[in-house]
Amino acid sequence: MKELIDKMLHVEEQARMLLRQAEQETAQAVADARQAAQAQTEQALEKARDEARKLIDLAEQEARHEKDRRLDERRAAIADSVTVSETAVREAADTVLRAVLHQP
């Protein structure tokens, strides 16, 4: 009878040890899974940040090009509106000379 009780106690102790081991393995597996999920999340966030930076850089570059294009258009329009023909300059110079020299 004592052998049977000792055997049952031994089996019970082995069951407790197996349970503790299973709990430890489970806890380690959960910790590993959390760590892996955290690493994947960080990688995904970094990838999203990189993509956002690229999009922002592209948008800034496009905005600069558009600004430069508009400035060039405005410069050309101003230059066209201010351009005076050579004939008009000569006529103005002649008019000024006649006025200074008091000639009609």
Image (cartoon, rainbow, N blue to C red):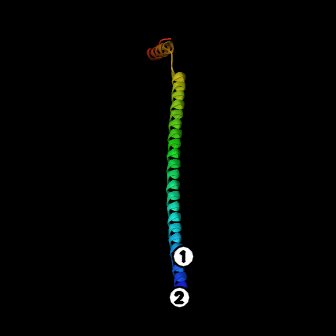
According to the picture, the residue beneath numbered tag 2 turns out to be: 2
Instruction: Look at label 2 and name its amino acid.
Output: Lys
Q: Indicate the position of residue 94 as horizontal and vertical percent values.
A: 47, 13
Choose between 84 and 12: the one closer to the eye: 12
Characterize the local packing of mark 2: few (<14), some (14-19) or many (20 or more) Cα atoms within 10 angstroms.
Answer: few
The foreground one among 84 and 49 is: 49
Q: Examine the image and state in which quarter residue 74 appears.
A: top right
Q: Residue at x 51, y 40 (%)?
A: 60
Figure check: 93 above or below 67: above
Q: Secondary structure at mark 1?
A: helix
Residue placed under numbered mark 1 in the picture? 15
Secondary structure under badge 2?
Answer: helix
Residue 28 lies, with reference to residue 42, above or below; the image says below
Quadrant of the image occupied by residue 1: bottom right
Give whichever of discs 2 and 1 has the lower sequence position. 2
The percent position of residue 33, horizontal first and vertical second, equals 52, 60
